[in-house]
Amino acid sequence: MAQEVQTTTALPDMVVTATRVPTPRDRIPAPVTVIDRQMIQENGYVTLADALATVPGFRLVQSGGLGQIASGFARGANARQVLVLMNGVPVNDPSDPNGAFNFGNELLGDIERIEVVRGPVSSLYGSAAIGGVVNLITRSAPADRVAAPYFEAAGGSNSTVRGFAGIGGTIGMVDYQITGQGLSTRGSNAMAPRFYQNGGELDGLRSAIVTARLGLTVGETNPGEIFGRTRVEGLIRGRQNTVGLDDVPNDDPNYTGNDDSWFGYVRTATDLFGGAWTTGVTISGTHNRRRYTNFPDPGNPYSSADDLYRANRRAASWDNTLRLPDAGVLTDVVMLFGGQWDKETADSASGSEFFRTTVDASQRSGAGYASIQGRLFDRLDLTGGVRYDGPQGFDGFTSWRLGAVLALPEISSRLRAAAGTSFKAPSLFQRFGVITGFFQGNPNLRPEDAFAWEAGIETDIGSWMTVSAVYFDSRINNLINYDQTFTTLINVDSARIRGGEFALTLRPTDWFSMTGAWTVQEAQDRTTDQPLPRRPRNVASLTMRFAAPLPWDGPANARIVVVPEVLYTGASPEGAFARYNDDGTSIPVAGKNDAGTVVNLTATVPILEQLAGFVEFRNLGNSRFEPANGFVIPGRTAVAGLRGTF
C-alpha cells in the first residue's frame, strides 16, 4: 500500500501537484498519495504500473506482464480521463485514439517521487484531469556534493536482467543529474492458460531509458531587493521499448510492439520583490512513435498488420506565484496565475488494408488560470481556483474547484471537503479519424465534462494509528461514444460514480508498521443503467513493513527491511463480447471478470554502509488473475540484486 505520508525529499511533508505550490499534505483539500524513492525500493516497484497498483481509488488494468499495455481508472473515471505529468508537464500521448496514457511503459530508476491526486484537477491542469493527476518527479541533484553516483543491478526469473546507474551533483552555480536504465526479460505469456489454443509463447520486453537534467542557479533572494534568485533548468528523457504482444484469445508469436518517446523542457523561475513574487516560463516538447507489427504465422496465417502512430506536443506556459502578507487572522495567502499554449499533432495508420483507420491532424489550445489559498484562524485552510481552456475548433470550457480543510487539534483530526468541475477534450482521432467508406470522426464534438464533490475525515490516535475515510460523488456528462450506425462519434453518454476510500495505518513500534486501504465504489452508465466495465466494486490492499536490527555486526543503525504486500481486486463488470470462453469464443452478454488476490514480498539486507542486497518475490501464490479478460498476470517470479550509493 502506498503510504499517504512518507517522503525523503528536502520538503518531507510537502506536496506540489495538488496546488502547484509546495503545501503541507494535511492542509490540502484533496486525497493525495505520495510514493517516494524509499518506498519504490523497499516495496520492489520496478514499473509505474507496479507503484500505482496500491493507490486507493486507482485501479490499474494491465494486459499481461512487464511492458504490456496498462490503463489507469481513477475514481471510476475512464482511462482517458486521467492526466499524467512529468515534473508538472503533461505527457499523455496525442496519437492514442482516446488520448490516454499507457502506464505499462515506464521504469522508475530515474524517478524520485510519484504524487497522485484523486478527484477533479482541471482548474489547475486543464484537459483529462477528471479522475485525477499522476505526477512523476525525476531525481534532482544533491546540493551538498560534487558527485553522488548510484546504481542498481538485478536478475532472476524469466531471464530477467535489469539495472540503472546514475550520477548527480552541484558544482558552484551548476547542478546536474543523469540516469541510464534498462530491462530485458523473456517475459511471461500474457494469454490466460485456460484457453485451449494457448501455445505457451512468452511475451518479452526490452526497455532502455536515459534521463539528463541540468540546472543553473544565479543570485540570491534577499529581503527588499527587486531581483533575486533565478533558476534555469533543462531536462531531456528518451525511452525505447520493444514488447511481445498477444492477440487474445490467440497466442501470437509474431505480434510485436515498439514504443519510443522523447520528452524535454526548459524552465525558468525568478524571484522578485524579496521572494514575494516568483515568475517563470516553461517551454516543452514530447514526441511519441508507436509501431505494432503482426505478420502471418502457423497459428494465425491470415494476420497481417503494420500499424504506425506518431504524435508531437509543443507547449509553452507562463506561471506565477504571489505570496501575500498576513492580515490578522488570515495567513499563508498564496495566489497563482498564468497561462499556457499548446499544439498537438497526430499522424497514424492502423488496421487491415481494406479497413484502415487514419489520422492526420492537429489542434491548438490556449488557457489561463488563477487560484488562491490561505489559512483562517490558524486552523481553516481554504483554496479556490478557476481556469478557462479555449481550444481551436470546438467549445471551450471553464473549470473551477473550491476546497477546505478544518484542523481539529482537540481531537487530532482534520475534516476535508471539496467540489469542482473538470473536462476531457476530444482526441484527434475522435475529431478527425477516418475509415474510408465506413467511419468519419466528428470535428464538432464537445468536451466531456464532470462535476464532483467529496468530504472526509482523517484522525490520529496517539502517534501509533491514523484512520481516514472519504466519500466521493461525480457525474460525468457528454461522454463520447459511437452513434447507432457506428459511422461517427457523438456526445451521447453520461455516468454517475460514487464511493468511499478508507485507510488505516498502524505504527505501534519503530520496527513494524502496517497500512491497509479499501475502496468501494459504484460506477453506473446513466444512459443504459449498466455498470461501467472494468470498475470493480471493491479494491483493497494491505502492506506491512518489518525493520529488524541486523543479527550480525554491520553498518550502524542498519536494518533488514521486509515488506509483504497483498492486493485484492473484486469481480469487475465487463461488456458483451469482451469476455471469452475457454475455447476462445466470445461471450455475447455482459458479465463479470473473476476477483483475484496477489501476494508480493520484498526484502532488503544492508551489506555495507552504502551497499544493500535485495530480493523481490512477485505473485507468491501463483495466482492466475485476469485484470482484463483473457490477459493473465505473470506467475510466481523472483529477482535478486544489489543497489548502492557512493
Image: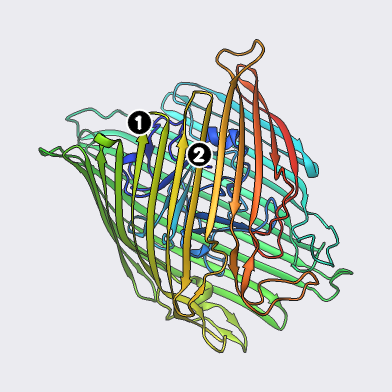
Q: Which mark is residue 515?
A: 2
Which image quarter: residue 163?
A: top right
For the point 39% across and 44% down, the residue is 468
Tell me the CA gap for discs 1 and 2.
43 Å
Label 1 crowd bin: few (<14), some (14–19), many (20+), radius 10 Å: some
The answer to whether marks 1 and 2 mark residues whose Cβ atoms lie closer than 8 Å is no
Q: Which mark is residue 218?
A: 1
Kind of residue at badge 2 = Thr
Which secondary structure lies at badge 2?
strand
Q: How is the image coloured?
A: rainbow
Residue 95 visible in rendering: yes
Residue closest to the far right: 298
Residue 280: x and y in percent read 33, 45
Residue closest to the eye, 212 or 429 = 429
Which secondary structure lies at badge 1?
strand
Residue closest to the eye, 556 or 284 = 556
For the point 60% across and 38% down, the residue is 109
Residue closest to the eye, 440 or 392 = 440
Kind of residue at badge 1 = Val
Q: Which mark is residue 348?
A: none
Residue 358: x and y in percent read 61, 76
User: 407 left or right of 347?
Assistant: left
